[in-house]
Image (cartoon, helix red, strand yellow):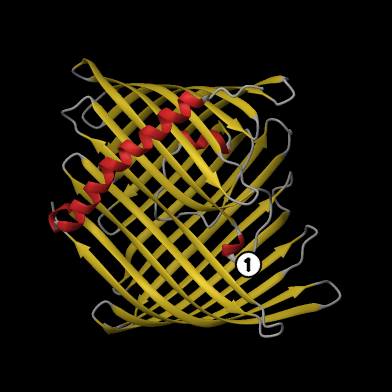
Amino acid sequence: MERRAGNASRLSLTLLYVGVVCAVWPLAVTAQSFSDNIQTLSGSASVFTGVTHTRTDRGTSTDTNTEPSVGLSGQVGGTLEKGANALALQYGGTLETSRDTASGDQTDNSSITGASRYTHYDPGSRFDFNLGHTVSSVRNDTGFVVNPSSYDTRNTLSAGAGLRFYPGELSTLRLSSQAGRSFGKNELNDQESYTVASEFSRRLSERSTGSLNVSRSWSDERGTDITIDSAQLVYSLQMESGYFSIGAGGSRADTEFTSGTTSEYDAATGFVERAWVTTDWGTSVKYDRSLSDSATDLSLNLPPGFSFLPDTVRLRDLVVSDSLLITHNNQFVCDACNLGVYAEGSILDSQAAGATTHEYRAGINLGFQLTALQRLNFGYSWEGDAGEDANIIDDQIHRFNTSWTRELAENTTFGVQFNQSCLRSRLVRNDQDQFELRFVLTRGFAMTGQR
């Protein structure tokens, strides 16, 4: 079967990536050189040593394993802006070497997650473009692991451009194209998708806007060609306390399998979102219903918000997804503490297999500034998968994180971390508990500027 995206499309996409990267790199270097272009930029590098104890329930017996380790970790994040150019990024990675005390075997583990997005938007110009990158931990099926570095890693690149027209003083028409490609390892297959779209928007009042969005996407999912047509009406309202947005429409998908057979699927789609934003805290609630698959999302979805990047991303086929996400950030719960909370539930109806699955994730992070030099943080996250019955969790993972840090000098800290992971499964898998104690020495930097 011939693929719909040929060599010409691959070449065009490659040239687009190279061209935008060439534009972004000088911007990033320039922004780091002049503090007035930096809104926020921070990072750190750490060396650590610790010990990890793992218990595995075999049913009739329990296996235990203890591994001392040493490693390096680092993270960087921030927002850089100069004129019409903006770059937002957040990355973190770890390289660790551990030794099994029982057998003497040595193991090297590494992991990296994060996202970045570059945009060029000038209100005085008709042209805009963007470039996105994400690196995430990916799982192909239901199931969790206690060690996050055991997941497969996928890099995703997305790039696109738009052209705006103004048919009236209050109206705007934007024609755009977006492309995405992923690169995986081990059992992951490379995926790609392309989307063309048009958006006609009209300002209804000083704070409200209405728009009509139409798009067509092409993707290749493990040899299956998928075309998705979507149309949606959207209403957005900016308020003093935040914003409100709602959309409704429909999607139609045509699939061509490797056997040569074709299928068609239809679904009503839409979303509603309400956000409350102040200088100290922000809360958002969003319900979304969509028809898509993992390959199509490569071009439709730009890198997610950085506040709550998921621990893992589950690859999926063509599904109708209903999801509800609630987030809350409060910088000043009390005089010396901050709070972050999120909860999300999704119902996925597979169009090809006809199966229904449920996915859940939730988490909380609470930080206390004990003294001017000492800080205490508590974190908890949970992920769970269920089948047809939403109340029966087939697989779940609990993660608890506690850390204490003390500032030794400017931008230099020493910390103690205690991490616990609990894996519980109804499937043909073994329950596991993992306990990790780390001693961490960190050197960081932070820059803040005003435009």
Residue with the mark numbered 1: 146
Give the image quarter of residue 436.
Answer: bottom right
- Provide the secondary structure element on which disc 1 rests: loop
On screen, residue 204 above or below 427: above
Of 320 and 429, nearer the camera is 429
- Residue depicted at x 25% and y 37%: 120
- Residue depicted at x 21% and y 14%: 168
- Is residue 398 visible to the viewer in this orientation of the structure? yes
Q: How many marks?
A: 1
As drawn, the residue found furthest toward the right would be: 60
Give the image quarter of residue 48.
Answer: bottom left
On screen, residue 140 above or below 442: above
Which image quarter holds the N terminus?
top right
Q: What is the crowding at mark 1: few (fewer than 14 residues within 10 Å), some, or many (at least 20)?
A: many
- Residue depicted at x 52% and y 82%: 50
Q: Position of residue 382 (x, y in %)?
A: 58, 61
Q: Is residue 451 left or right of residue 136?
A: left
Of 158 and 172, nearer the camera is 158
On screen, residue 343 above or below 120: below
Of 387 and 252, nearer the camera is 252
Of 358 and 104, nearer the camera is 104
The type of residue carrying mark 1 is: Val
